[in-house]
Amino acid sequence: MAGFRQRASTACGLTPAPGGPPLPPPPRRGRPPPRPPADNAVAQCPPPPPTLRPLKIADVGTGSGAIAVALAKHLPAVYSGGCLITAIDLSPDALDVARGNARDHGVDPQIEFVQGDLLSNLPADADFDMILSNPPYVSRAEYDDLDPTVRDHEPKMALLAGERGTEIIARLIDQAASRLLPGGLLAIELSPMIAKDCAVLIAGNGHFHEPKLIRDLGGNQRIVTAIRH
């Protein structure tokens, strides 16, 4: 498992991919590419299925498509089963940017783009090995205090989650529980201010093993992961 996680990190551009540099950030305008904490979530990949079938991955709140494009570009080189990625966003403008980035990197056939609110607009039988998300997680109180380099350059709907900051993540946890295959991974970027609250939400859902909080390079609890029973 550790070896596969290392290969997954490589696939996401955290370390140089064999034979070349990491995938550069998508060149088109749109939401900025994920910060390292978002990419770190992908390093928590579960082991590949023993049948080497394609991994079914959902990127919820794909924005510019950076995570989906990086996985589609590099994962087939380190996992022979390949991958089928569903990139979801509520914003049609964001999806247009993500589609363009996928075309620019030659991976658009591997990614299905879906407009919808979290996982609610998917077919009833859609299920996944991995659900990754960098959702809105800023509370209303935090929003006005955000660094202007973030607040003034990302759409408000991509940042503001509600009064507490946990509202969208709570909905995603419940939806992911019914979409993940047994042993599947849920990985969510979040604010350190709500990290423990989100871990409690996952534990209270009843369909996941004990959640794990992962610290970013600054030592902040930035990602919560959990494995589906």
Image (tube, rainbow, N blue to C red):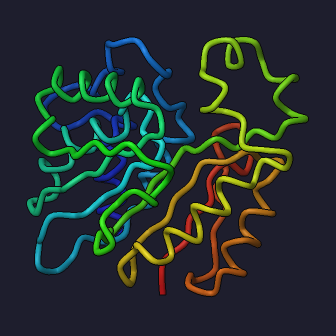
Relative image position of residue 134 (x, y in whole percent): 54, 44
- In which quadrant of the rendered image does the N terminus lie? bottom left
Can you name the residue that lies furthest to the right here?
141
> How many marks on residues?
0
Q: Describe residue 207's horizontal placement relative to residue 39 as left or right.
A: right
Q: Position of residue 218 (x, y in %)?
A: 71, 37
Q: Position of residue 10 (x, y in %)?
A: 31, 43
Q: In terms of depth relative to the viewer, which is nearer, 198 or 43? A: 198
Which sits in the foreground, 190 or 164? 164
Residue 67: name its quadrant: top left
Choose top left, top right, bottom left or bottom right for residue 20: top left
Identify the residue at image location x=14%, y=45%. Answer: 110
Question: As displayed, is residue 141 above or below residue 197?
Answer: above
Name the residue at 44% across, 69% down. 185
Q: Where 173 sits versus 217, above or below?
A: below
Horizontal and vertical percent position of residue 188: 57, 54
Of residue 224 and residue 161, the one placed in the foreground of this image is: 161
Q: Describe residue 22's horizontal placement relative to residue 195 as left or right.
A: left
Q: From what the image shows, is residue 29 above or below residue 43? A: above
Q: Residue at x 63, y 56 (%)?
A: 214
